[in-house]
Amino acid sequence: MHPFLINIGPVHIPTYGTMLALAFVSGIHIAIRLGRRVGVDSALILDFSSWAIVIAVVGAKVLMVLTMWSYYRDHLGEIFNYATLRAAGAFYGGFLAALFFTIYYVWARKISFWKFADVVAPSVALGTTVTRLGCFSAGCDYGKPTTAPWGVVFTNAFAHEANGVPLGVRLHPTQLYESLTTLAIFSLLLWWFPRRKRDGDVFLGYLGLYAVGRFFLEFLRGDESRGFVFNHLLSTSQFIALMVLAGLAVVFVWRRVHRGEELGTVPGVSDRLRTPQAGNAAAKGVVAQMPRGGVTKGSQKAKSKM
């Protein structure tokens, strides 16, 4: 396709890098808008995002190196070369690294993990939608050969050299498949967000939907370098997707036990993001009034017993 958005003389602006930057910006924008609905400060989201983006990029590179360790163990010097740094990395590596950082971040700030995760989950889905368009342009994460009329043929020599995509062969556009899948997930999460019954529903919904979608899309992928387990039975991403689904089953049982909790509460975790009760009362038009004549003796006695 078009690995470079601009390629004039010494100026080379990669399409993937441009789409990745657009994914970050659009994701932060969505998170800020959703955060305002539930009382999450925009500055908090910006601070979190600045750290999470860096950690996610590093995590994606680490998992990529681990899945290709059979190559990198004999070429240790290439772990930090330009080609490795330019590579997209493995999605689940970046996601898991960002997830662990999120757990630490909300613990350090003493805020609700479930509410915060609901705010950022749609942004991850949107970011993947945009990023996969960059993958399509660069020729990475390509699909298996196909005779389908919507198959695509890559002809760019740089894309073949950098990512190994076969040239002149009709392939499944798996990048577009995943982009459309995550766009559908993003739309569903946006619809679900104001209708969720408990904090964490949107985040857990994203985990399950993406894991299922990614598991089946992996069967159409043709890039062997993404890594496999169990003697090529499953790709690394398929294995992680199954682990995510197993973890979701455990969390689902735990949340069923605590189904009596109200929206916005998490056992044992203080929630600075929750709207104050006075604010809720004002929003409902209820205004507390002092009794005429100031504070009564009864109220003074009651206060002294508190």
Image (cartoon, helix red, strand yellow):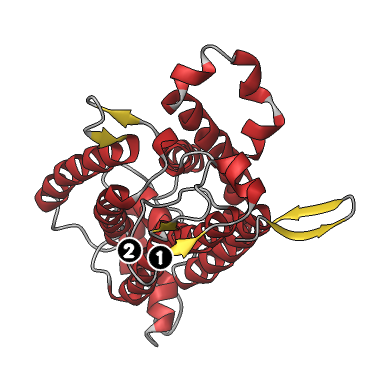
Identify which residue, 15 or 223, lies in the foreground.
Answer: 223
- Mark 2–mark 1 distance (CA, rounded to whole Å): 7 Å
Q: Tell me residue 122's x, y (percent).
A: 42, 63
Identify which residue, 198 or 58, lies in the foreground.
Answer: 58
The label shown at residue 151 is 1
Identify which residue, 100 or 186, lies in the foreground.
Answer: 186
The quarter of the displayed image where residue 213 is located: bottom left
- Is any part of residue 290 visible from this angle? no
How many numbered discs?
Answer: 2
Q: Residue furthest right?
A: 9
The label shown at residue 147 is 2
Instruction: Inspect the image, locate mark 1, and give the three-letter code of the amino acid beneath it.
Output: Gly
Please name which of the two marks, 2 or 1, marks the residue nearer to the observer. Answer: 2
Assess whether mark 1 and mark 2 are in contact (beta carbons under 8 angstroms).
yes
Q: Tell me residue 49's x, y (percent).
A: 59, 50
Q: Tell me residue 269's x, y (percent).
A: 34, 44
